[in-house]
Image (cartoon, grey):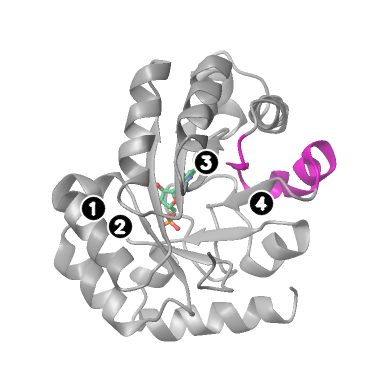
Amino acid sequence: MTVSDSRIVVALDYPDAAGALVFAARVSPALCRLKVGKELFTVAGPQLVEQLVARGFEVFLDLKFHDIPNTVAQACKAAAALGVWMVNVHASGGRRMMETTREALEALPQRPLLIAVTVLTSMDAAQLAEIGLPAPEVQVERLARLTRDCGLDGVVCSAQEAGLLKAACGQDFKLVTPGIRPADASLDDQSRVMTPQAAVAAGADYLVIGRPITRSDDPVATLQRIRQSIEATA
Ligand SMILES: O=C(O)c1cc(=O)[nH]c(=O)n1[C@@H]1O[C@H](COP(=O)(O)O)[C@@H](O)[C@H]1O
């Protein structure tokens, strides 16, 4: 079931539940989807996720699971029980991990979208070389093809790789793109970035945006502005 037509997924990287709930109270499920990541989940737990779902939001539970197949599959089943819209794992966990997890979710009456992280958007070519990996686009394409072969719904990648991946993996393979930065925004710790408009034009299905919205003077006005800026492109 889809309750939002928004491509924007706001990363609720707040230090506590209160901050996240204040933001959620100021927006509607029609305006954006919400992402709960490691910081917020560690402090506020499943209860907060259930609260956001109960308020009608489509929630991306971003815990980037990376472990042995059984552990990841069971963790994703537990996430599905919270009623979330999307969960993610690391593609570098490999074929068996991804296939086991997909099969576990497919056995459920209702399942979230299952997405795999390719190469973190904070990583650039130099950082990848340091850990023995090839250039970002090479590694991203390799992991995206593996993810598609394992039957997952899509990948997390930079919008810089969106064109390449739509061509390699097909139009229906979902591309979830963090590292989104409006032209005047600070890059923070992100390396492979794109503006919201360029990301949509390149083929990104969902834009994950955190600090440029949540740390702006008026988060809701910033979200509205970004929505309007991509409507013309979409
Ligand atoms: O899986 C993710 O959501 C993710 C993957 C990735 O490669 N890069 C990335 O930044 N993220 C998440 O996307 C969000 C980006 O936040 P901002 O950099 O503040 O816009 C953070 O919550 C990250 O944890």
* Image spot of residue 135 (x, y percent): 68, 26
Amino acid residing under circle 4 = Ala
User: Range of the magenta residues?
Assistant: 152-170
The earlier-in-sequence mark between 1 and 2 is 2
Does the CB distance between marks 2 and 4 fall below 8 Å? no
Nearer mark to the viewer, of 3 and 4:
3
User: Closer to the observer: label 3 or label 2?
Assistant: 3
Q: Which residue is mark 3?
A: 114
* Disc 2 target residue: 13
Q: Which mark is residue 40?
A: 1
Q: Are marks 1 and 2 in contact (CB under 8 Å)?
A: yes
Circle 1 — which element? helix
Residue 138 visible to the viewer: yes
Q: Are marks 3 and 2 in contact (CB under 8 Å)?
A: no
Q: Is mark 1 within 8 Å of ligand 1?
A: no
Inter-mark Cα distance, 3 to 4: 19 Å
Residue tagged by mark 4?
A: 159
- Residue 152 position by quadrant: top right
